[in-house]
Image (cartoon, rainbow, N blue to C red):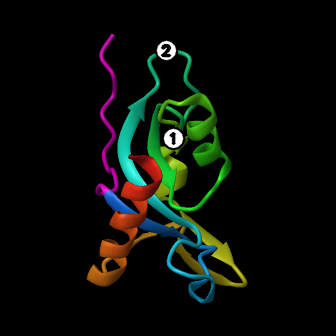
């Protein structure tokens, strides 16, 4: 069986979920994209052939699970869902937005290292 290759994937790096509130700090709804996962069975539901593998940069349940289990744990979301736009209050925008500000990226890299090393 040959695994289908996704047509588009996000770049590795740091992203904010659309619910990010800058007044709550740099970590609020901040995530680090680490990989793309492939569903290895023939019976994957349409849109769930690929997953985005990422981790939160705040103390979400997957972070707690990593500490409790003693092994790395990650969030996984269907890639198509990660890449889609959402509409809220009549406005349409990406569900996740790549962070491009160098100072914010430096701060999130430090947070990632502290949380997951």
Closer to viewer: mark 1 or mark 2: 1
Where 79 falls versus 44 (above or below)?
below
Mark 2 secondary-structure assignment: loop
- Residue 50 occupies quadrant: top left
Where 14 falls versus 24 (above or below)?
above
The residue that disc 1 covers is 74
Where in the figure is residue 25, as x and y percent of width and height?
Answer: 56, 82
Mark 1 secondary-structure assignment: loop
On screen, residue 42 versus residue 2, left or right, reads right
Residue name at image x 67 percent, y 47 percent: 61
Decide which of tag 1 and tag 2 comes sooner along the chain: 2
Where in the figure is residue 63, as x and y percent of width and height?
Answer: 58, 47
Residue name at image x 49 percent, y 50 percent: 55
The verdict on residue 5 being magenta is yes
**Measured Cα–Cα span from mark 1 to mark 2:** 23 Å
Q: Magenta region: which residues? A: 1-12
In front: 49, or 73?
73
* Chief SS of the magenta region: loop
Binning the other alpha carbons within 10 Å of mark 2 as few (below 14), some (14 to 19) or many (20 upward) gives few
In front: 22, or 84?
22
The verdict on residue 92 being magenta is no
The residue that disc 2 covers is 42
Binning the other alpha carbons within 10 Å of mark 1 as few (below 14), some (14 to 19) or many (20 upward) gives many
The tag on residue 113 is: none
Residue name at image x 44 percent, y 18 percent: 40
Check the picture and name the quadrant holding the N terminus.
Answer: top left
Where in the figure is residue 21, as x and y percent of width and height?
Answer: 61, 82
Residue name at image x 56 percent, y 38 percent: 66
On screen, residue 111 versus residue 105, left or right, reads right
In front: 37, or 29?
29
């Amino acid at each position: 069986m040959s695994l289908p290759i996704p047509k588009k994937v996000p770049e590795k790096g740091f992203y904010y979920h659309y619910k990010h509130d800058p007044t709550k700090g740099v970590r609020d709804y901040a995530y680090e994209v680490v990989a793309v996962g492939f569903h290895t069975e023939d019976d994957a539901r349409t849109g769930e052939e690929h997953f985005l593998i990422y981790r939160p940069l705040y103390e979400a349940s997957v972070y707690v699970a990593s500490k409790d289990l003693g092994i790395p744990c990650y969030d996984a979301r269907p890639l198509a869902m990660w890449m889609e736009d959402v509409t809220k209050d009549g406005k349409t925008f990406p569900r996740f937005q790549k962070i491009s500000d160098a100072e914010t990226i430096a701060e999130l890299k430090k947070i990632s290292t502290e949380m997951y090393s």
